Image (cartoon, coloured by chain):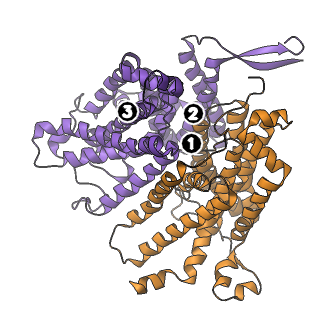
Amino acid sequence: MIRLRLEQRAATPAWFYVALPVAAMLATLLLCAGLVVLAGGDVIEAYGTLFLSPVASRFALVETAVKAAPLIFTGLAVAIAFRAKFWNIGGEGQLLMGAMAAAFIGGREGLPAVSLIPLMILAGALAGGIWALVPALLRTRYKVDEVVVSLLLNFIVFYGMMALLDGVWKDPLSGYPDSPDIREEAGFPILLPRTRLHLGVGLALIAAPLVFVLMRKTVLGFAIRAVGENAQAAAYAGFSTARVTMATALLSGAMAGLAGVGEVAGLHYQVMAGISPGYGYTGIVIAMLAGLNPLGVVPAAFFFAIVITGAEAMSRATGIPVYLSDVIQGTALITMLIALLFTRYRLRLKGVGHG
Amino acid sequence: MDDIWGQIFQVGFFAALLRIATPLILASLGEMFAERAGVLNLGIEGIMLLAAMTGFSTAYFTGSLWLGLAAAMATGMVMGALMGLLTVSLGLSQHVSGIGVTLLCTGFAFFFYRLIFGQPGVPPSIEAFATVKVPLLSDIPLIGPVLFDQFALVYIALLAVPVAAFVLFRTPWGLSLRAVGESPRAADSAGVNVALTRYQALILGGAFMGAAGAFLSMAQFNAFTFGVISGRGWVCIALVVFGQWSPWKCAAGALIFAAIDTLQLRLQASNVIDVPYQVFLMLPFVLTIVAMAAVSRNARAPAALLTPFRKEER
């Protein structure tokens, strides 16, 4: 009798980190093809539209990049936090905090025009970071599980935001629960004329390598990884787990906050209910797909930007529900998690009786 | 003000409180079973949502509410088994697996609802569960209408609490379950099948979560909406901590939470306090966090929670 067993692997070959996400994505698409068939669709046509329409023209490519910007930021937020095994599932709420801070600053008439954009970026990062500090503080001070707190905070900030938008912060001109538009000078500059490619996309592309360097080459990055790999050993080496956790939360929340800044300053020029269709949660999938590597977050974010925008085109063309994109995200997270097993284990065929 | 409180604390208040507590009791019992066996099931939010959808759809097409409930529970059991595959058989991170299951179930719920019902102007609805009057007992003043004129599922949830406590603390299987969550190595030496027991706990827990989801779309409301769960699953994770992994205390926590939720709903409706209604919606979540902060430092979770068990590794 031959049986399969998992054996510990000494070292992970570098190419695994590219091959595994690709394999996981192929498995995901194969599994989700079943749903396409179930919905009465043609798999080739559905996937063809889904993956080609977001890259088929210059205009579509720009739109995909615009969609990828917040996803890069929320992906980085999770990549940083999960490295320290700080389970920050609150990216969604931190994004909303960043968006609100940016919209608030961007609407202030008293501020000099040139200071608006830097202040919005700063305030948004700070607001997201501070919001992420709440679960970090509760974890380090009161041993409260940060998963539940960060999740509950998403609901709290959403309802809080809607209370403001429905009340004191409502745009008197539109009559909808939206905030008033930010000032003209507060909008991010457009990088490519006559498109929506805004500064936020550039910032996201710069942020990824910066976070990579921070995680690999600085003491803080080392501390974050050390705490994540072995908190006891890190404490033994002189790192304060509590302080490292707070720094991780601040940094992670700041990234998610920046996602919100970009959406306000570059795209919507205001805050409204639908400002984030779950970018915070998609960030988790993206970070896992990237193997928590900040550089890997960029292609992973582009992949999901394609899936999200492409699913709309596919739905219009074939009638398959647009929510296929949500199923793909959930399946991708699970298949990638399984695929990551192969970085630690190898499959061995064994004849029983020999070992 | 006296007048307002008089209006709020009527018989209807306590009857509504029990209804709001029911899904929380069911789902937190489900989560408690999983965690007692050593597995944190963060799939709870998604499982409840998907079960609310499958239960509703089954009832819609078969006309049988009880078949709908069965479908919802079966959904929960399948997803509990999936959680077992990921965290027990493969030993993957319980945190990330749970989030994955929630995302997957959420996607499934949205996808299939849209596939089955399309985008109708008026959302499809069913004839939801009606209340069942217990003969004689429902005639008792005050207590009767609160306790004995409720949905069948309310009775089931209330009965489930002592049953769960009995199973957990007084049966051999309950002992194995707790042993597996506290010290899988010792349980294994004693001849308990750790993996099997964890699967059983996750599947049983899933059935409870499924029933909770079904209650929301088939008793409390008569339709499925995308926001039908809106954080209740996460609240149940907190309730299990607050309830110190005890069925009685979990149920007590659910009742306290439901009291606050019922109160905020009544205050919202009474229009006496002039704040946006979202502030009221926020309140239960804020209090949940405060409650967790108050109890977590002294909470003693099952010792093997979050740790996978591999027989061959020492």
Nearest to the eye among marks 1 and 3: give it. 3
Q: How many marks?
A: 3
Locate the C terminus of chain B by quadrant.
top right
User: Residue B192 at what x, y percent from top left?
Assistant: 84, 38
Q: Amino acid at mark 3?
A: Ala
The colour one sees for chain B in the rendered image is orange
Nearest to the eye among marks 3 and 2: give it. 3
CB contact under 8 Å: marks 1 and 2 = yes
Up/down of A57 relative to B259, above or below: above
Q: Is residue A2 left or right of residue A165?
A: right
| Mark 2 lies on residue | A333
Assign a secondary structure to mark 2. helix
- Residue name at image x 16 percent, y 43 percent: A184
**Which dot marks residue A247?**
3
CB contact under 8 Å: marks 1 and 3 = no
Q: Are there few (<14), some (14-19), or many (20+) residues within 10 Å of tag 1? A: many
Q: Quadrant of residue B63?
A: bottom right
| Mark 1 lies on residue | B103
Up/down of A269 relative to A121, above or below: below
